[in-house]
């Protein structure tokens, strides 16, 4: 009960549904009671009118009365709904059993009009009428049958309410669901957005009551986008400003290396040059990250994934050979994608560079691409230590590096990959290359079928 109260206090749709349902239920109950009572009274009034018409018919046709004999019966005669017509003064000739159909023991002093009497233990509705000849007649019927017929008539009149009530409740529930459906669709649309998708929400198809809230969100998204753009511009400008001094330092270090110096000075110069190279690499990665977070130009031509693989392998093969790592493409099937070449090259190069760096000497790095699950699946797997499940969300954060890793790097490679993947509408999955031994890292990128230009050709 407490859970329902909490939901009721938090959900406008539930409150509205409960309120409308209660209002409909109360109105339906009151209308049903009124309809039942009205139909019941109307049925009784019609039955009283029937007694009156029988009395009028008796006088118009100048009928005479012959009371039935007790030993005989008439086919189809219903004792409960039987109408008895008699002279009021014949009450003294009434039999002891009122069920026989003879005259009833009615008092001769009854006034003209309708009345309800108990005769022989049974309730009767009696109409007394004085004829033009001066004689008085009584037309009577048991009230039990009258009331039963009236109740049945009233229930039949109430039946449409009983059918309409649940139908109306279902219609109200469905109507509320459809009215709130645009809000649910909007929530799902916002939930599917990536971190960089800060374009305004379309408020044209939304109810007027929700539109101010959506407009406020759009203004907030605009401010966030402006803030992020300022941050990206600052990072790019800072990286550009730092590139020139580091390049100058690198040139000075190269000139200094040509001079005569002691072994100790040369060792320190080597450490200095290595630090300068790390700084230059970090600046290049920062520039790449800033570029990846900005909308790229549309592709000018279909892009071969294998051609990108070849370029990356040409660039990184010396690093792989240095560690004696077996690196290559597993499958011959190529796929052409409608992607920007710079984007796909940055993604593959960062993934392969990470795989080579974290794979032990003598290991293996495999690249593959194929058509799977209604799209393009690109994989880069290695025989390194892999990434624990608990760390797989954090490895995409800038400057995050796995604990215990001895590799030197900036921690920006996977951040660049994630930024490009989200911008191009892809999905990224991390897993183990060897699920049984839980070793090795397998990174899978999936692009939808809409980006496929054509599946290719054997190379």
Image (spheres, helix red, strand yellow):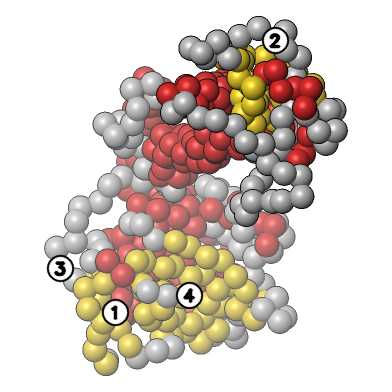
Residue at the spot of label 3? 301
Q: Secondary structure at mark 1?
A: strand
Residue 81 percent across, percent down from the top left: 65, 38
Q: Residues within 10 Å of mark 2 (few under 14, many from 20)?
A: some
Q: Earlier in the sequence, mark 2 or mark 3?
A: 2
Q: Residues within 10 Å of mark 4 (few under 14, many from 20)?
A: many
Q: Secondary structure at mark 2?
A: loop
Observer-side mark, 2 or 3, equals: 2
Q: Residues within 10 Å of mark 3 (few under 14, many from 20)?
A: few
Q: In what quadrant of the picture does the N terminus appear? A: top right
Residue 363 sits in quarter: bottom right
Residue 315 is at least partly visible in this image: no
Q: In what quadrant of the picture does the C terminus appear? A: bottom left
Q: Earlier in the sequence, mark 1 or mark 4?
A: 1
Q: Residue at position x 70%, y 10% from top?
A: 110
Q: Residue at position x 55%, y 10% from top?
A: 134
Q: Residues within 10 Å of mark 1 (few under 14, many from 20)?
A: many
Residue at the spot of label 4? 380
Question: Disc 4 versus disc 3: distance between alpha carbons?
Answer: 24 Å
Determine whether 262 is above or below 364 in the image: above
Question: Disc 1 versus disc 3: distance between alpha carbons?
Answer: 13 Å
Residue at the spot of label 2? 110
Q: Residue at position x 72%, y 12% from top?
A: 108
Q: Earlier in the sequence, mark 4 or mark 3?
A: 3
Observer-side mark, 1 or 2, equals: 2
Question: Disc 1 versus disc 2: distance between alpha carbons?
Answer: 107 Å
Question: Disc 1 versus disc 4: distance between alpha carbons?
Answer: 15 Å
Residue 64 is at least partly visible in this image: yes
**Does residue 405 appear left or right of residue 32 in this picture?**
right
Q: Residue at position x 77%, y 39% from top?
A: 99
Residue 97 sits in quarter: top right
């Amino acid at each position: 009960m407490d859970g329902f109260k909490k939901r009721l206090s938090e959900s406008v749709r539930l409150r509205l549904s409960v309120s409308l349902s209660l209002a409909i239920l109360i109105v339906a109950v009151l209308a049903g009671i009124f309809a039942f009572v009205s139909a019941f009274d109307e049925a009784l009034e019609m039955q009283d009118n029937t007694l009156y018409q029988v009395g009028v018919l008796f006088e118009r046709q100048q009928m005479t009365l012959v009371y039935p004999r007790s030993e005989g019966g008439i086919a189809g005669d219903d004792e409960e709904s039987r109408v008895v017509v008699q002279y009021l003064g014949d009450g003294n000739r009434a039999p002891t059993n009122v069920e026989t159909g003879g005259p009833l023991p009615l008092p001769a002093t009854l006034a003209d009009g309708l009345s309800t009497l108990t005769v022989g233990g049974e309730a009767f509705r009696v109409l007394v009428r004085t004829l033009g000849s001066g004689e008085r007649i009584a037309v009577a019927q048991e009230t039990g049958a009258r009331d039963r017929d009236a109740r049945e008539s009233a229930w039949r009149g109430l039946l449409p309410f009983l059918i309409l009530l649940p139908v109306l409740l279902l219609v109200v529930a469905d109507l509320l669901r459809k009215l709130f459906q645009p809000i649910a669709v909007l929530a799902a649309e916002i939930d599917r957005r990536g971190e960089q998708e800060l374009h305004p929400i379309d408020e044209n198809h939304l109810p007027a009551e929700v539109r101010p809230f959506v407009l406020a969100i759009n203004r907030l998204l605009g401010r966030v986008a402006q803030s992020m753009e300022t941050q990206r511009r600052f990072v790019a400008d800072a990286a550009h400003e730092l590139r020139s001094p580091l390049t100058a330092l690198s040139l000075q270090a190269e000139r200094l290396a040509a001079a005569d110096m002691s072994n100790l000075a040369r060792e320190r110069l080597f450490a200095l040059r290595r630090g300068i190279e790390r700084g230059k690499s970090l600046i290049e990665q920062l520039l790449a990250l800033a570029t990846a977070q900005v909308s790229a130009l549309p592709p000018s031509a279909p892009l071969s994934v294998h051609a990108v693989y070849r370029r990356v392998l040409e660039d990184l093969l010396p690093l792989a050979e240095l560690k004696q790592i077996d690196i290559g493409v597993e499958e011959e099937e190529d796929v052409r994608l409608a992607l920007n070449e710079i984007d796909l090259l940055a993604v593959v190069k960062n993934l392969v560079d990470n795989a080579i760096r974290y794979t032990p000497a003598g290991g293996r790095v495999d690249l593959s691409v194929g058509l799977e699950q209604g799209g393009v699946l690109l994989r880069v797997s290695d025989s390194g230590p892999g990434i624990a499940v608990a760390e797989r969300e954090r490895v995409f954060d800038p400057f995050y590096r796995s604990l215990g890793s001895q590799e030197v790097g900036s921690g920006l490679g996977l951040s660049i990959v994630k930024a490009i993947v989200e911008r191009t509408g892809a999905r990224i999955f991390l897993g183990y290359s060897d699920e049984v031994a839980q070793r090795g890292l397998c990174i899978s990128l999936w692009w939808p079928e809409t980006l496929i230009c054509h599946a290719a050709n054997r190379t």
